[in-house]
Image (cartoon, rainbow, N blue to C red):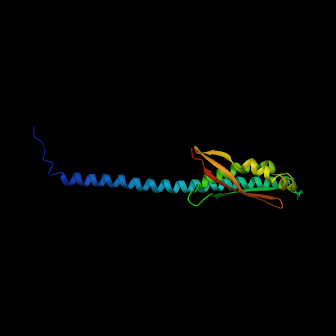
Amino acid sequence: MRVPPFARYQRFLASCGLLLSGAIIGSAVYMSIHQHTYNQLYVQMHKYLEENRDLRSDIDNLNKTRNKQALINVVNVYLLPKDQNELISEDIQKEIEGDVKNELKLVIGQKAAYVRDARPLYERLITQRIYTLHDKKYIVEVRSIVLIQTELTIWITAEEKRT
């Protein structure tokens, strides 16, 4: 039995290998670009859905307390970074803000004077609270609480709990 000489096919095999490796590298680059744009689209959609949910709840609360000016209509929660080195991703920030806002839904519809007098109670309700998101625990602390007419605004900080 005779073995064919592969010296004749050396260039052909090298070009096939180069073509195959180019296809693999090209598909990997395309897939990484596709995943990146899809991730950006998902984060943007999540942000818009959260904003839509907040606006709908604000409209419902305003309709509920339309003729009563001395009642709290809107609760706003803003998450500030505790220090510049530790940054929390935008989707986790929105989830923490939403959780704190859900805990403070009981304030909506109450008299503004009562909320102003019970400020330490609401501060203790949120401070040192642990939220578990994406298998990580975050400790929330209140920076400041401001009541302007019928709008309660709360600034909080969150840091990842190290175990």
| Residue 107 visible, this orientation | yes
> Residue at image x 10%, y 40%?
2
Q: Position of residue 33 (x, y in %)?
A: 46, 57
| Residue 71 visible, this orientation | no
> How many numbered marks are there?
0
> Residue at image x 72%, y 49%?
126
Q: Nearer the viewer, residue 105 or 87?
A: 87
In the rendered structure, the answer to whether residue 107 lies left or right of residue 159 reads: right
In the rendered structure, the answer to whether residue 82 lies left or right of residue 115 reads: left
Q: Position of residue 28 (x, y in %)?
A: 40, 53
Pick out the residue farthest to the left.
1
Q: Position of residue 79 (x, y in %)?
A: 66, 57
In the rendered structure, the answer to whether residue 74 lies left or right of residue 24 reads: right
Where the C terminus falls, by quadrant?
A: top right
> Residue at image x 15%, y 52%?
8
> Residue at image x 55%, y 57%?
40
Where the N terminus falls, by quadrant?
A: top left
Q: Nearer the viewer, residue 157 or 36?
A: 157
